[in-house]
Amino acid sequence: MVECSPSSESDSARDLSPLSQEIGFPLDPTRLARRAARLALEKKARDVRVLDLQELTSVVDHFVICSADSDVQVKAIATHIQETMKQEGSRVWQIEGYDAGRWVLLDYVDVVVHVFYTDTRDFYSLETLWGDAKTIEVEEEGETRESA
């Protein structure tokens, strides 16, 4: 299991938005995004990426984007992320698209997780829209590759 707890309360709180501090998220946005990406991989998500948007917008710090081959898998990935993060102390703020199963959005305030059915991801192409973002490709076995 990946160790994701912050080193101290003060270190963690310093990196959180006021809303995240109010809600009580235990992880800073970068750790939360990487944790969500790892959880997606546990349910066999494909092409898992973390987009660092901190330099591009003040609305959100990170997007986690991943693909699934069926609506059942989309829901399974989203449910796994939501339930595990809740057990670890990070509750989702808003969920959109779960019933349709084509694109589920899990809003953790500073981090937004997008779980896409493959064709839907290709159509909306968020990576192209946010092409200036630093991208971290998350792979199994703890490997990551960063690109500018």
Image (cartoon, rainbow, N blue to C red):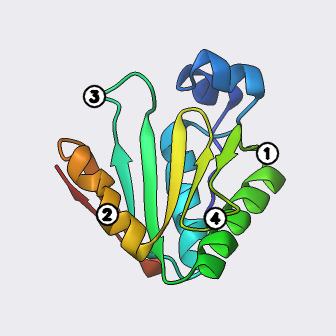
What element does badge 2 sit on?
helix
Q: Is residue 114 left or right of residue 19?
A: left
Residue furthest toward the top?
A: 18
Q: Which mark is residue 100?
A: 4
- Disc number for residue 89: 1
Q: Residue at x 41, y 75 (%)?
A: 118
Of the numbered discs in the image, which one, if any, rests on residue 55?
3
Tag 3: amino acid: Glu
Mark 2 or mark 1, earlier in chain: 1
| Alpha carbon separation for disc pair 4 and 2 | 16 Å
**Depth order, front residue of 46/26:** 46
- Give the mark nearest the N terminus, 3 or 4: 3
Residue 123: numbered disc = 2
Q: Tell me the kind of residue under disc 4.
A: Ala
Q: CA distance from mark 2 to mark 3?
A: 25 Å
Location of residue 11 in the rendering, given as x and y in whole percent from the top left corner = 59, 27
Residue at image location 49% in from the left, 83% down from the top:
69
The residue drawn where x is 79% and y is 51% is 86
Mark sitting earlier along the chain (2/3): 3
Dot 4, crowdedness within 10 Å: few (<14), some or many (≥20)? few
Q: From the viewer's perspective, tell me whether residue 76 is left or right of residue 130.
A: right
Vertical arrangement, residue 52 with respect to residue 76, above or below: above
Residue 26's x, y, as percent?
71, 38
Question: Which image quadrant for residue 79?
Answer: bottom right
Q: Quadrant of residue 87?
A: bottom right
For the residues carrying marks 2 and 3, which lies nearer the camera in this image?
A: 2
